[in-house]
Image (cartoon, rainbow, N blue to C red):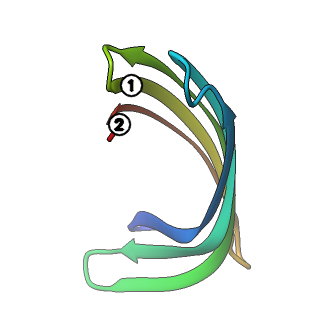
Amino acid sequence: VQGGTLYLGTAGLNLQVGAGAAQAQRLSACISGGAAFITVATGTEVLAKTVPYLDAGIQAGIALGRDFFLGGDVRFLIAFDEDLLIFGAVPCTSLCKEF
């Protein structure tokens, strides 16, 4: 893809398995797949298509007080376009509250 900015969004099913739901530390692994929405925006036009994707990742979290968790997550994503293979690693940090 030349001459434009590439945007990628995903929608799919996620399966997550982990340990530590009742503990101060948590560790889990996940896998997901579905539709990836690829959009290329140039100065004059916007092109879009939908392709399949697969991603997998790991997540760890620690308790902050009684109801909050601070977590780190890294996911590896592959989008299967017929013209090119899109691969990326996505790190993120999260703050969660349990209800």
Total marks shown come to 2
Residue that mark 1 sits on:
69
Query: Foreground: 10 or 1?
Result: 10
For the point 63% across and 79% down, which residue is it?
51
Crowding near pointer 1: few (<14 within 10 Å), some, many (20+)? some
Query: Foreground: 84 or 33?
Result: 33
**Quadrant showing the C terminus:** top left
The x and y percentages for residue 1 are: 54, 69
In the structure shown, which secondary structural element does the residue marked by tag 2 occupy? Answer: loop
Residue positioned most to the left:
43
The x and y percentages for residue 61 are: 50, 23
Identity of the amino acid at label 2? Glu
**Residue 48, quarter of picture:** bottom left
Image vertical order of residue 24 relative to residue 98, above or below: above
Identity of the amino acid at label 1? Phe
For the point 45% across and 67% down, which residue is it?
9
Q: Which mark is residue 44?
A: none
Q: Cβ–Cβ below 8 Å for labels 2 and 1?
A: yes
Q: Is residue 23 left or right of residue 66?
A: right
For the point 31% across and 14% down, which residue is it?
65
Image vertical order of residue 53 relative to residue 58, above or below: below
Query: Foreground: 28 or 35?
Result: 28
Upstream in the sequence, badge 2 or badge 1?
1
**Residue 42, quarter of picture:** bottom left
Image vertical order of residue 61 relative to residue 43, above or below: above
Q: Give the CA separation, mark 2 to mark 1.
A: 8 Å
Q: Can you see residue 44?
A: yes
Q: Can you see residue 79?
A: no
Residue that mark 2 sits on:
98
For the point 51% across and 68% down, which residue is it?
10
**Residue 40, quarter of picture:** bottom left
The x and y percentages for residue 88 are: 60, 47
